[in-house]
Image: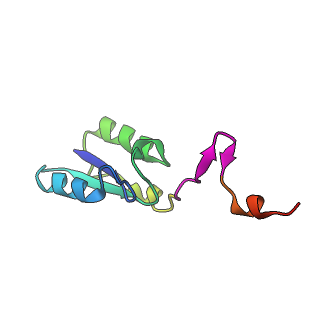
């Protein structure tokens, strides 16, 4: 069993993944830093999922590719991410 959690997920926090992993033999819980709900869409998570499905085990997954995952920018609207520098500019 592969269990993915985002470290800033308010809906299903990593502690829930830890709890599930304790009750599933051969499971692996990977927590992605700077990530909320929906880990599979960030960074290399889809590659990890594909590898898991192909190899049928989570024990060989190298999840270090998620170590430098940064929190995504905050969007106020569809125009793009919020930038306090641009908003505070007098130009």
- Counting from the top left corner in percent of width and height, residue 51 is at 36, 41
User: Would you place residue 43 above or below residue 14 in this image?
Assistant: above
**Is 49 in front, or is 74?**
74
| 59 left or right of 83 in image | left
| 37 left or right of 71 in image | left
- Counting from the top left corner in percent of width and height, residue 58 is at 27, 48
| Residues drawn in magenta | 70-81
**What residue is shown at x 24% (from left), y 53% (from top)?**
28
**What residue is shown at x 17% (from left), y 56% (from top)?**
19
- Counting from the top left corner in percent of width and height, residue 22 is at 13, 57
- The answer to which quarter of the image holds residue 15 is bottom left
- Does the magenta-highlighted stretch encompass residue 78? yes
- Counting from the top left corner in percent of width and height, residue 59 is at 26, 52
**Is 29 in front, or is 58?**
29
| 68 left or right of 77 in image | left
Classify the position of the C terminus by image quarter.
Answer: bottom right
**What residue is shown at x 27% (from left), y 48% (from top)?**
3
């Amino acid at each position: 069993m592969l269990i993915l959690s985002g470290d800033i997920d308010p809906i299903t926090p990593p502690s829930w993944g830890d709890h599930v992993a304790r009750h599933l033999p051969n499971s692996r819980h990977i927590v992605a830093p700077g990530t909320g709900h929906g880990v599979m869409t960030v960074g290399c998570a889809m590659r990890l999922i594909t590898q898991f499905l192909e190899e049928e085990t989570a024990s060989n997954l190298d999840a270090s590719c998620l170590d430098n995952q940064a929190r995504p920018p905050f969007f106020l609207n569809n125009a793009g991410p919020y930038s306090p520098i641009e908003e505070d500019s007098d130009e």
